[in-house]
Image (cartoon, coloured by chain):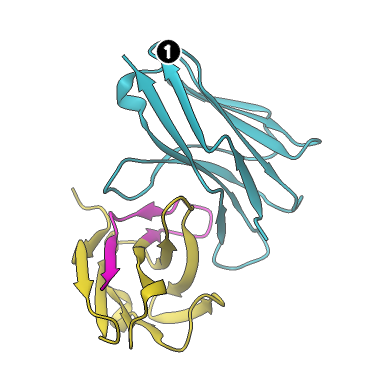
Amino acid sequence: QQQVKQSPQSLIVQKGGIPIINCAYENTAFDYFPWYQQFPGKGPALLIAIRPDVSEKKEGRFTISFNKSAKQFSLHIMDSQPGDSATYFCAARDPGSTLGRLYFGRGTQLTVWP
Amino acid sequence: DTGVSQNPRHKITKRGQNVTFRCDPISEHNRLYWYRQTLGQGPEFLTYFQNEAQLEKSRLLSDRFSAERPKGSFSTLEIQRTEQGDSAMYLCASSLSRNQPQHFGDGTRLSIL
């Protein structure tokens, strides 16, 4: 059972466009929602994260929008650049475990055309 | 750069052989995680160490898999009698505490012939 559902699977935008990646979850106990960026041959790198008591968080060109009632959150990339072409993963943390277990979505492969 | 380091980066082996991967976490991080990532999927949790103690294991970690973290520093993940289905990227992550971000290494890509 997929704890975090991510869409779309792939996304193609022109340079300067605003790609939006969506994630949904069921477990209302999740307490932390990070986004990771992964380039080919590299490990995931933390991009931005949000907690459920905040509806929006911005860091540079990256924004997370969080809708607690709908159990959905999304990543927006402003003024996208070819260098943003990568796979993006959303995740959610289970507060019930001592390890802070993360559940990942299946990823979105973003391509930004110049 | 003193990030998470994993070796080897790639491993090709024949089915039935044993393989061992190494992870060196960020030096002050006492929490260490192993994940598996297959094509088109996000990382899936395998096991977790706090210092030298292995505190949690996923159902994905069959009895052919064993992980250690002697002295709470580096960790090794061994797969015995490898199978085709073991082909994947094995990722290691570390964190300072439960509420701090997990930082990933670049993984070891395992290919089973």
Task: Write the residue at 37% across / 80% down.
Answer: B83
Q: Residues within 10 Å of mark 1 (few under 14, many from 20)?
A: some
- Quarter assignment of residue A67: top right
Identify by letter the chain in yellow. B
Question: Is residue A4 placed above or below A62 in the rendered structure?
Answer: below
Extreme right residue here? A69
Question: Is residue B24 placed above or below A91 in the rendered structure?
Answer: below
The x, y position of residue B99, in whole percent, is: 53, 54
Task: Write the residue at 37% across / 75% down.
Answer: B84
Along the line of sight, the residue nearer the viewer: B43 or B86: B86
The x, y position of residue A46, in whole percent, is: 42, 42
Task: Write the residue at 56% across / 77% down.
Answer: B59
Along the line of sight, the residue nearer the viewer: B26 or B111: B111
Q: Does the magenta portion include B107? A: yes
The x, y position of residue B97, in whole percent, is: 47, 59
Question: Relative to B71, is A96 on the left or the right?
Answer: right
- What range of the chain is rendered magenta? B93-113
Colour representing chain A: cyan
